[in-house]
Amino acid sequence: MSYNVEVKNIVKKYGSKTVIDDISFNIKPGTIVGLASPNGSGKTTLIKLIADFLTLDGGEITIDGQKVGPATKAIVSYLPDHELFSSDEKVSNAVKFYIDYHKDFDAEKCKQYLKTFKIDENAKIGSLSKGTREIFMLILTLSRDAKLYLLDEPLANVDPVNREAIVTTILKEFKEDASVIISTHLLNDVETILDEVIMIKENKLFCHKSVEEIREETGKSLNDFFKETFKVDWFGGDNK
Amino acid sequence: MNSKLALETTKKLLLTNIPSVLVYLVFQTLANFVDNNYIKASSYVLGALDLISIVLYALCIAVVVMSLLKTLVMDLFSEKSYRYYSLPYKKSVIILSKAVPAIIIEGLMVTVLFQGESIQDLIGLMFGKSSYTGQPVEVLSEVVSNRISIFILNYMIIVTIGFLVLLAFVISRSFDPSKIIRNLVLAIIIEALANIILYFVIENISAIYSEKYTEAVQKAVQVSPILSDKELYASAGLIAYYNEIVTAVFVLIMIAELICAINASRKLADKRLNVV
Amino acid sequence: MSWSFDETRPLFQQIVERITVDVVSGKFKAGDKLPSVREYAVEAGVNPNTMQKALSALEESGLIVTQRNSGRYVTEDGKLIADYRKSAAQKAAKDYLDFTKSAGLTLEEAIEVLKEAESK
């Protein structure tokens, strides 16, 4: 079985605090995986470790057979959860950056999507609505021909109409030899497109399962399963 | 270093900085020309020229500061840096590819602004007149050639200081940013060592140049008593104040690193660690 | 616009049901070409692997046939489609009669209601 992403016993500490405690999982090519855990559980740290933005304290991550490093950045397309370009930069400049520096960038595909979503190439990025900006960043990320797409909260702060557009675009760009990891809280919007889900609880791996299996075994939607796994009794038994 | 990134950075910096500095130099040359050749020009005209000169000078400094902020701080040390760190190169390569052109080009711009008279003299040489003093160039040719050496030396000092600061940042940022205390200590040790070396090297070089320069000044003063040695000696620039500058820069770097470290540990506490 | 699903049940089963209904109701006629797995997945708003699983199950049941190099088609077997149509109708009928029984109607009254509904 050849895996696209192999995570073996990884550990990450900040000072004395262990944020990621001996987590292992493997992802096959052609899978869309959701990464779900409560705020502050190390989701973004995990993504940054895979994207080679942070260094491991223990364990190993390999992507397409190579250890994470500058070489894997060429086959990983990472969409962070914040702005990548200044608001006074033009859309066309951002596209040019990707064309210049990412050899696997498909400029034609990008231009097609810009037309579909009616994004004016001469517009300043700051003049686009938040939802459109997010779609634009997603277009740039998915127009690269990578082996792994890391999407960190692609739906946050986006209205339902644009959220659907984002989910549909992710589906449209599905590639059989690549994998997608989507880190999100908005499970309602993405659960139908996920093959598998990885959940982290208290800095350890809680489960890595097929979403359909979860539905079959528990009779719950992924969203409800998540709520049940991470529920906190805020009001001490008073909520009925 | 990555040549593509370095080239793109160089192009942008040149496009931003050259126009402003050129305008300043051209204006300054014209102003000096008027000053030295139209002694009857009214004080209002001269005053106005001075004022415009100061404004242009300030503009050039502003351009330098903004360029540095954009190329170094915004592109490398803010959230916008993610697009650069996603490129398939080592973090230190990315930082160096942007910072090295920035230091070389901005260092040159700062030196030109600082040591404008050297350029004036070069131009004066071309036209057969020293625009600074209005005296025939033959008298001052030795002083002029010394001034050029001083220009180069000042440029080297500025660029070395720039590289020291860069070194500190590369060390503290290209490693795992969660190990900020360790990196800070490392950076301070290296900076201290480099400053000590630089101090001894420059001290010795400037001693040599100071000697030659003083000789040349004395010669020139003998030939042409209109010149005051103070006027000529004053343009030795940074060399005359090397001790003060090294101390000041060292202190500034320490303060900057401390601020970054405090800021980073607050972020650690917030669990929102930026990639750099 | 994606299909609406009940996310508490496996999706692949619901996809099989939906496509069966589409065939049985005549939305897809015998011999019609189906969209590719990827297109169908985008249309339904589901993961292509899930869609693939559903289409494979439908192939096994014979409702869908694969022509090599040419894609997937609704079966030309009119009788098979008719059988599916009948059993779908039977299921709907059983659900209806379960309801009328629990509402206290006799079989004749239930049939009357059907006739009235038809003429409206």
Image (cartoon, coloured by chain):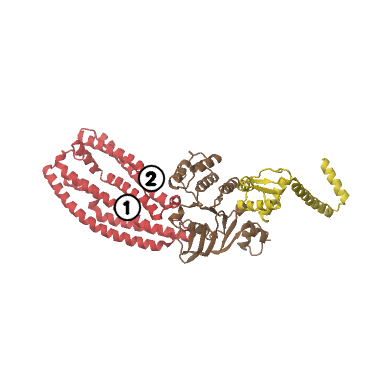
Residue at 82 percent across and 42 percent down: it is: C118
- Kind of residue at disc 1: Gly
Residue at 23 percent across and 58 percent down: it is: B200
What tint does the image give chain A?
Answer: brown
Residue at 85 percent across and 49 percent down: it is: C110
- Residue A60 in the image: state x and y as whole percent: 48, 62
Q: Nearer the viewer, residue B7 or A7?
A: A7
Disc marking residue B162: 1
Disc 1 chain ID: B
Q: Residues within 10 Å of mark 1 (few under 14, many from 20)?
A: some
Residue contact between numbered discs 1 and 2, judged by CB atoms under 8 Å: no
Relative to A124, residue A217 above or below: below
Dots 1 and 2 on the same chain? yes
Q: Nearer the viewer, residue B241 or C23?
A: C23
Which residue position is annotated with label 2?
B8
**Can residue C6 be seen by looking at this rendering?**
no
- Kind of residue at disc 2: Glu
Disc 2 chain ID: B
> Can you tell which quarter of the image residue B168 is in?
bottom left
> Can you tell which quarter of the image residue B20 is in?
top left
Residue at 21 percent across and 54 percent down: it is: B205
- Judge depth for marks 1 and 2 and give the one in front: 2
Residue furthest to the bottom in view is: A16
**Can residue B158 be seen by looking at this rendering?**
yes
- Residue A3 in the image: state x and y as whole percent: 53, 58
Of all chains in the rendering, the one displayed in yellow is: C
Left or right position of C29 against B191: right
The C terminus of chain B appears in which quarter of the rendering? bottom left
Of all chains in the rendering, the one displayed in red is: B
